[in-house]
Amino acid sequence: MSTVAAVAFAVGAAICFNLAMYFNKKAVADLPSVGLKQEKKGVLKAFLANKLIHRFMLFGVIGAASYVVAMSMAPVSIVQPIVSSGVVLLAYLAIRNLGEKPRRIDLFAIGLNITGVILIGVSLAEGLPKEIEHDPVLFWICVAVVIGLALLVQVVLRGRTGNRQAAALGISVGLLYGIAAVFSRLMIVDWGNRWSSSGVLALFSSVYLLGWLFTFLPAIVTVQAAFQRGMAVVVVPIFAGLTQLVPIVVGMVALKEPLPDNALLTAVRFVGFAFILTGTVILSHRAEEAAPGPTHSEKQVPGVEETPA
């Protein structure tokens, strides 16, 4: 029963996160653009009064809660691919927003994602691992390698412009988001283990919280920089793929998240990973390509004037 619940919470988080992302994208088109010299009161009023923003926050909170529960119950190498597969919903809503019919490649990718989630669920027939027993040394080596690669990509591709620079930033974002997901798994488990003895202090004294902050926050900043330097359709598929790949590899190698004892179930799980990874890359490209964008005449609110260039 716990296996079904873990998968259900992961699917719920996937749905809520992508609904939140869609409403956020729609809200951006209706909100005034922000400049340094604009009246912040007018901008804040427009933000708080926007119903789409309310939906974005509601689904974001529900998704985060579902994600925490799923992470506390199942390995990150299982949860993260399922959560990432929620891009199926975002792609569908983005396509519908333009009044288009899904292309064959869209239907193929949607089928891959749905089948991948089902296969991962089937691969859990033996149940979930009882405890997380990670190798601290190997884990921190993996962290150093991932962060080192994220920095190395920027050094090697320094001086590139446009979509090439955006692609390089997308690689770094995917690596950082991926390792942040692993930190979140360890952080949640650590909180649960120490809550009875440390109480609320367990929330703020975990080294994994610091690791999560130092990887997740730079990833947020870097993804915005990537979008500013190149097309989202270039950036998103890259970091969507790496955001899944890193937790799968680090989860199985450093966190010792076991594969099924049955060889057939192991094969089923790897096929599920491959299906979701492929489908997510295709659909994330499509979702950004068809996503609601700013209107030609941006809406302004009283008291807000565009800052001269």
Image: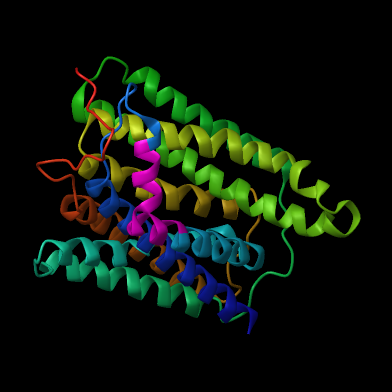
150 horizontally vs 277: left or right: right
Residue located farthest toward the bottom when viewing the structure as drawn:
1
Name the dominant secondary structure of the magenta segment. Answer: helix
78 horizontally vs 192: left or right: left
Queried whether the magenta region covers residue 281, the answer comes back as no
Quadrant where the N terminus sits is bottom right
Q: Residue at x 43, y 65 (%)?
A: 16
- Magenta range is 42-57
Residue located farthest toward the top when viewing the structure as drawn:
159
Pick the front one: 14 or 136: 14
Q: Residue at x 38, y 71 (%)?
A: 116
Residue 197 vertical placement versus 143 (above, below) = below
Residue 225 vertical placement versus 7 (above, below) = above
Q: Position of residue 198 (x, y in %)?
A: 88, 51
Residue 259 vertical placement versus 8 (above, below) = above
66 horizontally vs 165: left or right: right
Pick the front one: 21 or 288: 21
**Rendering colour mode:** rainbow
Image quadrant in which you'd find residue 294: top left
Q: Position of residue 257 (x, y in %)?
A: 63, 60
Q: Is residue 171 visible?
A: no
Quadrant where the C terminus sits is top left
Q: Position of residue 121 (x, y in %)?
A: 49, 77
